[in-house]
Amino acid sequence: MIDVMTNAGYVVWMLIAGWCMGSVFDFYSTVTGATRYLRWLRPILDLFFWIASGLAVYYLTFITIQGEFRMYTFLLICVGYLVYRAVFRRVVTRSAFAIVRFVKALILFFGRFFYRLIGIPVLTFVRAVFALVRIVYVIGCRLENGVAATVSVILKIVFFPVRNLMTPERRWRKKLQEWEQGFWVWLSNLLKKKPRSVS
């Protein structure tokens, strides 16, 4: 009687294991496939799924038949998976899609809420600061141009009496250059003359 109950419990647990494996696999596959932001998690979740499934099956065999492996273990798991696929798969996938839609709506709601609460004031402040900086820059450029024009006028007034001396092409410079050039010509001609013989 004990062996019959043990074997029956083992069969039931293996069927439940197949059902659970199918449910978990379809659930996380649906969730990760519903959005492109989670598809990169699929290989990692597959690895964890098969490791966890193997450990769970071993644990169930250990608590039911002291960890003895039997040939029909995989058959029972496959039967449980087929039962799940025929009866519960549509419910699980619909539930997964509903959860995905709910989470998306929740994220969108909180995103809009925090954008209006924090994002809009921050953007308004940043735009105001940039506008103020631009205004200060324009005013500074105009002040600089005004100061430069004022200094130019003052310098013209101050140096007006000596402007003729500061201009490189004025008459006195030309006369000085002509005199200097004539002096050097006269000196050159003087040196070229031969001295007269005394007799």
Image (cartoon, rainbow, N blue to C red):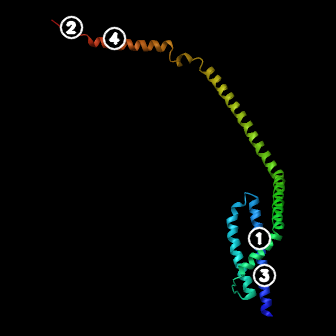
Residue at which label 1 appears: 24
Q: Position of residue 170 (x, y in %)?
A: 51, 14
Tell me where residue 102 sits by quadrant.
Answer: bottom right
Where disc 2 sits, the SS reads: loop
Q: Position of residue 43 (x, y in %)?
A: 67, 65
Where 177 falls versus 54 (above or below)? above
Residue at which label 4 appears: 186
Q: How far is the residue under mark 4 from the one under mark 1?
A: 115 Å
Q: Nearer the viewer, mark 2 or mark 4?
A: 4
Where 12 falls versus 133 (above or below)? below
Tell me where residue 19 sits by quadrant.
Answer: bottom right
| Mark 1 crowd level (few <14, some 14–19, many ≥20, 10 Å Cα) | some
Residue at which label 2 appears: 196
Q: Nearer the viewer, mark 4 or mark 1?
A: 1
Q: Of label 1 and label 3, which has the lower sequence position?
A: 3
| Mark 4 crowd level (few <14, some 14–19, many ≥20, 10 Å Cα) | few
Q: Are marks 4 and 1 in contact (CB under 8 Å)?
A: no
Q: How far is the residue under mark 4 from the one under mark 3?
A: 130 Å
Q: Of label 4 and label 1, which has the lower sequence position?
A: 1
Q: Residue at x 79, y 78 (%)?
A: 16
Dot 1 amino acid type: Val
Q: Of label 4 and label 3, which has the lower sequence position?
A: 3
Q: Of label 2 and label 1, which has the lower sequence position?
A: 1
Residue at which label 3 appears: 13
Of the pair 42 and 199, the residue shown nearer to us:
42
Dot 2 amino acid type: Arg
Q: Nearer the viewer, mark 1 or mark 3?
A: 3
Q: Residue at x 55, y 15 (%)?
A: 164
Where disc 3 sits, the SS reads: helix
